Image: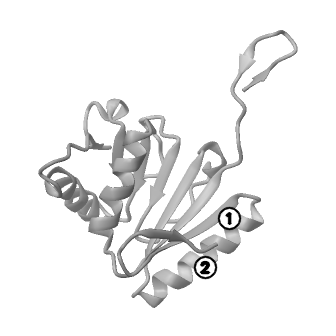
């Protein structure tokens, strides 16, 4: 927080953080719900961008059934009330739910408005050489744009460990 010259309190905008999650020993279908749960618990609004409508539909179905004990409220951009969802699945670069965190899967590109987010989360399949190559390009791109970057990988027990 900072106080402006007129005495008003304004929130202090921090630099966008770009976080890379290297999916090895943990598939997207397990890792994504875990990270979305943490985001939801923190009160963050999230948009998840996938490369295809089929992927959005599969994730939509999966997020309703992945865990009988937890409820993860979400919707898709096709919903009439998309702006109300705390977690929104889409294929577009838009931000209809005013998210501050954007997840990118399936090697989708960084959005043109990346700097408008508090956090961009890139999840990539460590078993797919093309996905790893794209992630390396995104890392270079994020650093060149002056974003703070971090790299996470699961350990042998499946816990996320920050590597860079």
From the viewer's perspective, tell me whether residue 90 is left or right of residue 22.
left
Image: 51 above or below 131: above
The residue nearer to you, when weighing 60 against 54, is 60
- Report x, y in % for residue 84: 34, 29
First in sequence: mark 1 or mark 2?
Answer: 2
Residue occupying the point 66% across, 48% down: 115
Image: 148 above or below 118: below
Q: Classify mark 1: helix, strand or loop.
A: helix
Estimate the spatial distance between the alpha carbons at disc 1 and disc 2, rounded to whole Å. Answer: 10 Å
From the viewer's perspective, tell me whether residue 97 is left or right of residue 82.
right
Image: 18 above or below 6: below
Image: 101 above or below 105: above
Report the quarter where the C terminus lies.
bottom right
Residue occupying the point 38% across, 42% down: 40
The residue nearer to you, when weighing 11 against 49, is 11
Residue occupying the point 59% across, 45% down: 117
The residue nearer to you, when weighing 158 against 29, is 158
Q: Mark 1 — residue?
A: 142
> How many dots with numbers?
2
From the viewer's perspective, tell me whether residue 18 is left or right of residue 63.
right
Residue at the extreme right: 5
Report the quarter where the N terminus lies.
top right
The residue nearer to you, when weighing 49 against 52, is 49
Neighbourhood count class around disc 1 (C-alpha, 10 Å): few under 14, some 14–19, many 20 upward: many
Q: Mark 2 — residue?
A: 136
Q: Classify mark 2: helix, strand or loop.
A: helix
């Amino acid at each position: 927080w900072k106080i402006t010259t007129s005495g008003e309190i304004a929130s202090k905008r921090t630099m966008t953080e770009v976080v890379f999650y290297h999916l090895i020993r943990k598939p997207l279908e397990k890792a994504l719900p875990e990270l979305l749960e943490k985001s939801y618990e923190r009160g963050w609004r999230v948009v998840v961008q996938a490369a295809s409508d089929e992927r959005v539909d599969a994730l939509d179905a999966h997020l309703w059934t992945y865990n009988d004990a937890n409820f993860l409220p979400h919707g898709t951009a096709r919903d009439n009330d998309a702006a109300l969802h705390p977690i929104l699945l889409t294929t577009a670069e838009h931000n209809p739910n005013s998210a501050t965190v954007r997840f990118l899967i399936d090697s989708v590109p960084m959005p043109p408005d990346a700097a408008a987010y508090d956090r961009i989360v890139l999840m990539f399949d460590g078993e797919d050489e093309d996905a790893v190559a794209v992630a390396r390009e995104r890392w270079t791109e994020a650093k060149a744009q002056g974003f703070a970057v971090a790299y996470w990988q699961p350990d042998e027990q499946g816990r996320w460990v920050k590597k860079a």
